[in-house]
Image: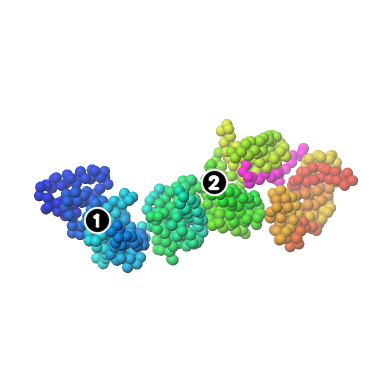
Amino acid sequence: MSTVQSIVDDILSKRHDLSAEQVFALIEEKKNEGRGLLSDEGAARLVAEELLIQMRGTDLGRMQVKDLVSGLNDVTISGRVLLAWPPREFQRRDGTPGRVVRVIMVDRTGRVPCALWDRHADTASKKGILQGKIIRIGHAYTRQGLAGDVEVHAGDRSSIEIDPQDMPISDFPEFSDLFIPLGKIATEANQVNTVGIVQMDPRIYSFTKEDRLGSVLRTIIADESGTIPVVAWNERAEELREIKRGEILQIVNARTKLDTNSRPELHVETRSQVAILESAPEYLKMPVAKTYKIGNLTAQTGSADLAVVVLAKNEPREVKRSTGDTVKVASLLIADESGIASLSLWDDKAELVNQLAEGDSISVKGISIRDRLGELRLSLGKSGELQKSTSEVASPSLSKLNALETAKGLLIVEGVVSDEPLMRQVATERGETVNVASFTLRDDVASVKLTLWRELATGATKLRPGNRIRVTGVRVRSGLGGQLELSSIPLTKIDAADKAVSERPAWEDIRQVIALESGLTTWIKGLVLEIVDRPTLTAKCETCNDPLSVSEGNLTCDHCKSIKAGKITLYGKLRMDDGTGVTDVILAEQDPRQFAPTDTLEFRERMLKEKRASIELEREFLSNLVGKELEVHGTAEKGERDKLVFKAKRIVTLAKL
């Protein structure tokens, strides 16, 4: 016999004025009133209550959570305790003391809040930790809670049993089944239970709302399936104030909320419960360390670890947060073979920029990612880590100007300046007046408008049509006419870019030595007769090209006021004969590796050891050039006693060294 039929029979045994058809019609009417929210059993019980029939809850068997409705007076229900709050004492209106323990109980059909009053509260308290245990409540009643949901109350005539021996455990979900992996948490969900490893020491802030002081704590937890930010409020924030990175955090009854990038955050509030576990439960799949590529990051990634190379940096500066606090921030332009991004270093991490040089490989852990106007912004705060790395990290390749539509993130482009940069001043949204320069950049496949801002605009006035430049860290944007343009960011770098060494001059472009004139830029070709002076290696700033100095065991730039990796350049002089005449070729700012196999790192270490950023070498360093034929591009200039010398810019060796 079904439970509904049993209820109907009980009604008919007490109400002889009703027929079975009438009772079933009342049940159907009650279901219609419930608009699909009532089961047959729940509707039957409400009909019985309205007909003033005292139902025999224990005789009718154990109810399921899905069948509970408000207003029942004799209910037997069982379930596993998901959540239990500490006992609370209170005073009734008549002055007598009272006690209550509140729990959330679940079965395979749903969850329901329960209140265990007075002696039942004492019984539950003596059982220790209730979470995870099976509880059976007999002769309970149901009421509508403040949130509008059904509550089960164990009062004077009720009974409770903790882990009853006759209760089949298979009737209830395993405790581990109640917890969801982080990667499967829905973007909009209530009553979320999960567990994860804390990925960052918490940040906690105080605020005032409606003359009340509150607090909010933020951290990130992870498991094998992913990560999620945790936002704890007020008393939950205070409970987690001392939590540390690497600890196991269990969260019950939280809810998700989307942040400004439409990513879910887990909000832990008054109705939630948090616990720091001493050991990992079996249902926690431990997170696996993963290093992302810049090109694979999205706003939904949330938090990531990177292995990157520093392309550019700026000095720490102070900014004001919306809270009024003043904090330090510095920025890095970072890259790997998949892309380029801007990384902001906050708080104590801002000072690390002074220990980094352009070209350094670094490992970054715990960055946060946000999307701002279609561009990913990376940030690293107190909870993150940044360390130098000995691993080589490749930079991304050049982007062609005809491929901007499919380009992602920041780019490196190279091309020739096609027209004179046009300088103007514009007013920003903040009321600043800044310099802006625009010109056309052309490569071998397309051309595009490039706009430079602030200091870069001032520097652009030195550019001339025909100059070949490399621009590192520019963003793509739509111009006023809808066409794609390039625009600088504060960390954008502009460097002079020679044509590839493999580009050989045409025979008609080579000038004879006898025909050289002062100021003439051209190609010459000849045989190396001898090395005139001892060559010198000098460390120069890779940003401003000024000579570096050695200070406190580092190469430093007085102009940039920062530590640098140092660009090792060769200075020297050799004598060359083309058959029509002899000229001295001045080598300035040449890469020493094109003339002799050498390890520039070895020379950096020697400079630091000898505390000087310039080293004089023996002539033998260039001796393998003697007898070789060279093609040299450069400019003829007047040297000592008005004798013409040829200052080399680019050299092509016609025989292997």
Q: Is residue 535 left or right of residue 180?
A: right
Height in image: 403 above or below 115? above
Looking at the figure, which quarter contains the N terminus? bottom left
Query: Which residue is pictured at 63% across the width and 52% down the height?
Result: 316
| Front residue of 419 and 182 | 182
Please report whichever mark, 2 or 1, sits nearer to the chain's N-terminal start: 1
Q: Name the residue under label 2.
A: 376
Viewer-side label of 2, 1: 1
Q: Is residue 513 magenta?
A: no
Height in image: 38 above or below 404? below
Query: Which residue is pictured at 54% across the width and 47% down the height?
Result: 322
Q: In which quarter of the image is residue 127?
A: bottom left
Q: Is residue 338 visible from the viewing direction of this image?
A: no
Amino acid on which disc 1 is placed: Tyr
Q: Is residue 87 visible from the viewing direction of this image?
A: yes
Return the x and y of residue 352 as percentages of the image width and height. Answer: 62, 56
Return the x and y of residue 164 as percentages of the image width and height. Answer: 26, 65
Question: Circle 2 — which element?
Answer: strand
Amino acid on which disc 2 is placed: Leu
Local packing at callout 1 (Cα closer than 10 Å; few below 14, some 14-19, many 20+) is many
Question: The magenta stretch spans which residues?
Answer: 488-510
Height in image: 426 above or below 598? above
Question: Circle 1 — which element?
Answer: strand
| Front residue of 651 and 8 | 8
Query: Which residue is pictured at 40% across the width and 48% down the height?
Result: 188
Quote the CA–CA distance across marks 2 and 1: 55 Å
Q: Name the residue under label 1.
A: 141
Q: Of all residues shown, which one is farthest toward the left?
A: 16
| Front residue of 201 and 87 | 87
Q: Is residue 509 magenta?
A: yes
